[in-house]
Image: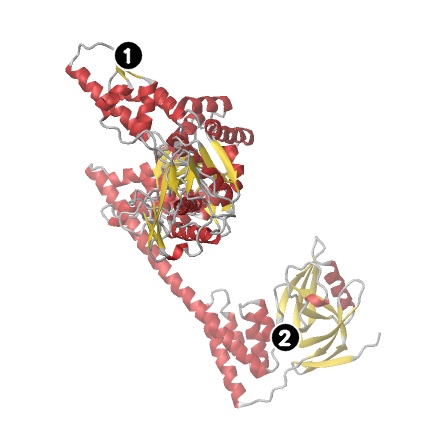
């Protein structure tokens, strides 16, 4: 390999060397010309390069690493601009590393990295500054010197001897390199100084960096001064408070505040708080000890400490994870609900095997009074956990969940932290009622705040705005309840496992009343079981004539009313013939006139009247739909407080009937000379949804053809313009309501065939479920007479089930 000789001048002395030299990579340091600096060298390749340089003219190239963490840098990992340095001294340490003292000579640029076996070598060229003396350069040099002197005075990490050293330097070049070497800035900024292309530009950059660093140093000094003043103030207050305590002790007065501080410290030590909470408590106690107990801030801090120390952090109860015990307690407390209880037992079985609660949150959804809240209480009793119930109905402020910040007057933690304080342990059962009845406004969305609480992956670090430290909710078993699944926000619903609780059947209500409600009411009213007896027939009559509900709350109130009237009789006349029996014939004397008829169905088949099925928050119900054609101009009138979706269903039903006018043998222009009035009774109750489309279409066909609709047939399903019947929801509740009303046949969309498996066994046995795909099948089942086949004109009269004859509708051919 050929070498070329390079010469450079330093301090009026000419140096000559080859243009290929070993390289020493530097970590987190940039060496400038005229700079003398000690370096520790430990990498074998670097030691080999130094040893090679020591055998020659003791010159070596110093290049800074781009990434200081790189243990084995290659040529591409080094900056291209560095310095050629002279090794002044080397010392080998016992561990094999070298300590060397080097002096920067001249700035160089790497032209090419050369291959070598043991160390890095480069071919380089020198980059000397050539700048003629000028007034501008002199002025810039003086400004840089003034800034550097101020910088040294402000920075305590630089020795004052630098001021003397810089004052004795006449060369702007040497002055610029010296100031650059002592600047405490980032390595990348130092490399930019080294790579500057001229002396004037170099001094400009030095002035810029000096100005920026001095701004930071002035701010640091200002902050230090403020901190020192505050420390002196705190020390003075502490000293005066200690003197005040000593005076109180000398006077024999009780120092209540001192005792309170010590009591708080003892509580914190006894509580065995987590490390973060312990630091927070100690900080607040220290703050309180320096305050006057009469100040408002002291009251805020004292209340905060009371909350922090009263919360459970490690206290817990031991779970009873016996699957048989859980099943027995659920059977004791609830009748029926077999699928719901089976799912709860499965949940507990998984908890027993896994040993920790990392599953979905249970959400019981069903009408009022079906046992959602009592199921949560039974789960807590079965597990041996403490139960805390909180209701979110009407909550519209996010702070109700997360708490208020302490800056507000009267601030308190949120409902979750308050529930944990009431529980007193970290593993209670928290029953959150009415999650579907939250709302949001300008104060925030509480359902969004509830997402973190109910997410098993996040709630181990729940932060209440008032408490301000992480609180672990992962060991809490959350159970939620709701009436309407549609009202639960989707992100919240995604974090919960929905368990639907349908309405009770007549037989289930009777058993619940006999086993649970009646003994409870007797006990609450001070009556013995032998004093008052109610027959099963009386309970059945009460359910059918005095209550219309999916649950049993109204039934319990009626039983309580009987007990109150009986208690009054016993109180007035002590000597009565016992027991007093309540039979169906005596119900009116105790409960008054029946509120409901035996059935909601019509007494006979009617033209233009179809029985639809509806689902509400109180369960299912029968929906009578009436259609009456009157002379007019083709308008469709809808009454009964119908929603937009239900109105659109009626319009779709009318379009279907018009499209089938030939098959139904209706006149082509029948709709131009009449108005159709569709009415759904109970007009004060809002109604909406697409599931009444089939019933509306059936009632229209009946009204226009004059064929009655069977009274014992009820139907549900959405209708399309082509007469297809689409699936709907709430089939379980609707079918239970149909059975309760005395319906014999229920028409379901075939798309809901999958829901048959969830239908109670008694309902499947008592009801005849007919699955349909189209309106033709619906009309064939629902109408009391056959629709004539297309062909000759229909006779003037058609027979109906009653044996009488009725005129054919005038709207047919």
Above/below status of 672 relative to 696: below
Residue at label 1? 530
Whether tag 1 and tag 2 are in contact, CB under 8 A, the answer is no
Residue 689 visible here: yes
Residue at label 2? 33
Q: Which disc, if any, is residue 302?
A: none
- For the residue pair 187 and 698, the one nearer the viewer reads as 698
Look at 34% across and 29% down and name the residue there. 552
Which percent across, then down, holds residue 557?
A: 28, 28
Look at 70% across and 79% down and name the residue there. 126
Residue 523 visible here: no
Position of residue 203 in the picture relative to residue 387 (left or right): right
Q: Please, what secondary structure does the residue beneath circle 1 have? A: loop
Q: Residue furthest left?
A: 572
How many tags in the picture? 2
- The tag earlier along the polypeptide, 1 or 2, is 2
Position of residue 396 in the picture relative to residue 88 (left or right): left
Q: Please, what secondary structure does the residue beneath circle 2 have? A: loop
Question: How many angstroms separate mark 1 from mark 2 (CA)?
Answer: 111 Å
């Amino acid at each position: 390999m050929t070498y070329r000789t390079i010469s450079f001048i330093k301090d009026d002395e000419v140096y000559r060397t080859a243009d290929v030299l070993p390289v020493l990579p530097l970590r987190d340091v940039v060496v400038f010309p005229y700079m003398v600096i000690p370096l520790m060298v430990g990498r074998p390749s670097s030691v080999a390069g130094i040893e090679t340089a020591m055998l020659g003219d003791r010159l070596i190239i110093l290049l800074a690493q781009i990434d200081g963490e790189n243990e084995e840098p290659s040529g591409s990992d080094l900056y291209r601009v560095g310095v050629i340095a002279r090794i002044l001294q080397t010392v080998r340490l016992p561990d094999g590393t070298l300590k060397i003292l080097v002096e920067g000579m001249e700035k160089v640029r790497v032209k090419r990295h050369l291959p070598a076996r043991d160390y890095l070598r480069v071919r380089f060229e020198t980059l000397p500054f050539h700048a003629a003396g000028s007034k501008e350069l002199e002025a810039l040099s003086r400004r840089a010197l003034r800034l550097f002197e101020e910088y040294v005075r402000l920075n305590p990490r630089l020795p004052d001897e630098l001021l003397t050293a810089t004052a004795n330097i006449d060369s702007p070049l040497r002055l610029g390199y010296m100031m650059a070497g002592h600047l405490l800035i980032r390595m990348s900024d130092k490399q930019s100084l080294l790579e500057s292309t001229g002396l004037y530009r170099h001094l400009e950059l030095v002035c810029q960096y000096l100005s920026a660093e001095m701004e930071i140093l002035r701010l640091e000094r200002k902050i230090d001064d403020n901190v020192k003043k505050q420390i002196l103030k705190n020390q003075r207050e502490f000293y005066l408070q200690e003197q005040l305590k000593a005076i109180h002790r000398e006077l024999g007065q009780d120092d209540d505040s001192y005792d309170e501080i010590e009591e708080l410290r003892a509580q914190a030590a006894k509580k065995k708080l987590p490390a973060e909470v312990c630091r927070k408590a100690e900080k607040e106690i220290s703050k309180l000890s320096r305050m006057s107990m009469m100040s408002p801030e002291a009251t805020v801090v004292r209340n905060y400490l009371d909350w922090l120390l009263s919360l459970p952090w490690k206290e817990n109860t031991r779970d009873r994870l016996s699957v048989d015990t859980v099943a027995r307690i659920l059977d004791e407390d609830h009748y029926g609900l077999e699928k719901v209880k089976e799912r709860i037992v499965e949940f507990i079985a998984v908890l027993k095997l896994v040993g920790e609660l990392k599953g979905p949150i249970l959400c019981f959804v069903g009408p009022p009074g079906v046992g959602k809240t009592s199921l949560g209480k039974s789960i807590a009793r079965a597990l041996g956990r403490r139960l805390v119930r909180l209701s979110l109905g009407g909550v519209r402020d996010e702070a109700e969940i997360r708490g208020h910040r302490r800056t507000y007057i009267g601030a308190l933690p949120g409902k979750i932290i308050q529930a944990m304080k009431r529980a007193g342990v970290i593993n209670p059962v928290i029953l959150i009622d009415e999650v579907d009845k939250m709302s949001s406004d300008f104060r925030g969305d509480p359902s969004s705040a509830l997402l973190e609480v109910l997410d098993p992956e996040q709630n181990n670090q729940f932060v209440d705005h008032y408490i301000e430290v992480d609180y672990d909710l992962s060991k809490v078993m959350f159970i939620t309840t709701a009436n309407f699944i549609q009202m639960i926000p989707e992100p919240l619903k995604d974090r919960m496992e929905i368990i639907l609780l349908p309405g009770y059947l007549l037989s289930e209500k009777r058993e619940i009343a006999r086993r649970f409600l009646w003994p409870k009411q007797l006990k609450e009213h001070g009556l013995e079981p032998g004093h008052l007896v109610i027959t099963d027939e009386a309970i059945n009559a009460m359910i059918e004539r005095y209550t219309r509900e999916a649950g049993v709350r109204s039934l319990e109130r009626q039983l309580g009313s009987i007990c109150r009237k009986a208690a009054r009789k016993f109180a007035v006349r002590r000597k009565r013939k016992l027991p007093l029996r309540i039979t169906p014939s005596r119900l009116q004397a105790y409960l008054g006139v029946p509120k409901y008829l035996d059935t909601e169905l019509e007494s006979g088949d009617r033209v233009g009247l179809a029985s639809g099925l509806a689902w509400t928050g109180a369960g299912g119900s029968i929906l009578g739909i009436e259609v009456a054609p009157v002379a007019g101009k083709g308008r469709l009138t809808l009454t009964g407080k119908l929603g937009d979706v239900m109105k659109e269903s009626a319009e779709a039903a009318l379009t279907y009937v018009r499209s089938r006018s030939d098959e139904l043998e209706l006149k082509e222009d029948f709709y131009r000379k009449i108005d159709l009035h569709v009415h759904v009774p109970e007009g004060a109750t809002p109604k909406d949804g697409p599931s009444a489309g089939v019933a509306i279409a059936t009632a229209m066909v009946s009204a226009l053809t004059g064929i009655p609709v069977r009274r014992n047939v009820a139907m549900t399903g959405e209708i399309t313009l082509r007469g297809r019947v689409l699936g709907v929801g709430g089939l379980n509740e609707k079918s239970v309501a149909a059975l309760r009303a005395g319906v014999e046949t229920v028409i379901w969309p075939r798309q809901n065939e999958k829901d048959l498996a969830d239908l109670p066994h008694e309902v499947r046995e008592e009801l005849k479920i007919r699955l349909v795909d189209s309106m033709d099948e619906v009309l064939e089942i629902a109408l009391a007479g056959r629709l004539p086949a297309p062909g000759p004109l229909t006779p003037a009269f058609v027979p109906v089930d009653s044996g009488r004859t009725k005129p054919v509708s005038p709207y047919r051919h």
